[in-house]
Amino acid sequence: MARRQVTEWLAPIVERFPDTTFKRQIILEGGDKDRVTPTLAEVAKTAGGSAFSSNQEASLVKGEVDVIVHSLKDLPTSVHDGTLLLMTPGPREDVRDVLCGSTLADLPMGASVGTGAPRRVAQLLALRSDLRVMPIRGNVPGRLARATKGELDAVVLAAAGLNRLGLVPGIHEALDPAVFPPSPGQGALGIQVRVGSSAAKLLAMTGDTCVDSCVRAERTLLAELHGGCSVPVGAWGRVGNDGLLHLSAAVTSLSGAEQVTASGQGPLEDPEKLGACVAADLLTQGAASILAAIRNP
């Protein structure tokens, strides 16, 4: 997946800067090496802060690499000192989560559904409390195979990953982001560089302003809630027909029994304000107690 994302980002960049040579370097992260630990939150504790970015950020700070291409949903809201995220490149892939193996309505009572993400677990149970949600880890083809081989009735995956890997035929249902909001930054790439570096200057204006505003609103909301990949926070930013930035979000208890939702809109030029406002609305409605119960069970 990481290689596909680099290829996706590099294609227009190489064309735009034909006199610059780009060399790929693979850096394995804790989440790549450890496929046994049940949750990414546990992997992150031993990986130095993030299951999918700690080693890469360290290499960037040391000058061993000049640019990192992230899956933005896996990147913490605060990046390493001395580094910055450039404007988010476009186009953004499909933000939706999808069910593979069955549609939600066709799953029988007590069906087994695989996902390792707390947000997906919580949102699934909010819609179908009868489901047996099973923790799964591993690469996208491996998780998809759990459903196609019949080990599980279905699995939840990101549409973006299946699209990038050419595995769209495995999708049975795309889940409506208005009801099943994705992880903040899902489907988008994050381009990280050192502050003041030649790469930062070269690539400064290579992003997409609309995509960037959407993900900045989502990530600001997540930061305001002090959330991460281990917290069931969903957020969906998009530009409406009215030209405004729209943001909707949900915080759900791990059992699915409690859920608070909020939405708002504002100018594209100030996504951070919108993200903070929607987060404040969630907190007013009781998101703080839901999150506190998750962090301190």
Image (tube, rainbow, N blue to C red):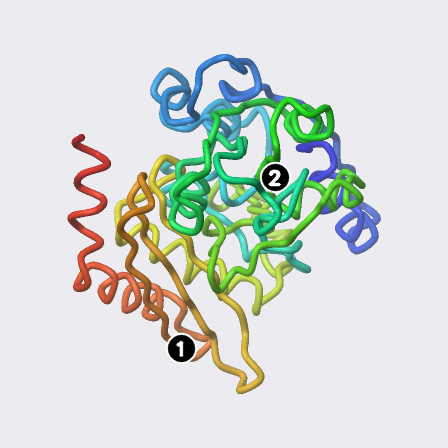
Residues 84 and 247: in front is 247
Query: Label 2: few (<14), some or many (≥20) within 10 Å?
Result: many
* Residue 233 point in image, percent of width and height: 36, 49
* Residue 295 point in image, percent of width and height: 21, 34
Looking at the image, tell me whether mark 1 or mark 2 is earlier in sequence order.
2
Q: Is residue 188 above or below residue 229?
A: below
Q: Helix, strand or loop at disc 1?
A: strand
- Which quadrant would the C terminus be assigned to in this image? top left
Query: On the rendered structure, is 199 left or right of 238?
Result: right
Amino acid on which the number 1 mark rests in the picture: Gln
Amino acid on which the number 2 mark rests in the picture: Val
Q: Residue under label 1, please give it.
A: 265
Query: On the rendered structure, is 179 left or right of 6?
Result: left
Q: How many marks?
A: 2
* Residue 122 point in image, percent of width and height: 38, 43
Q: Which mark is residue 69?
A: 2
Q: Which mark is residue 276?
A: none
User: Which residue is situated farthest in the front direction here?
Assistant: 109
- Which quadrant would the N terminus be assigned to in this image? top right
Q: Helix, strand or loop at disc 2?
A: strand
Q: Is residue 42 above or below residue 255?
A: above
How far apart marks 1 and 2 lie (CA) works out to 29 Å
Q: Residue at x 60, y 40 (%)?
A: 157
Whether label 1 touches label 2, CB < 8 Å: no
Q: Residue at x 45, y 73 (%)?
A: 246
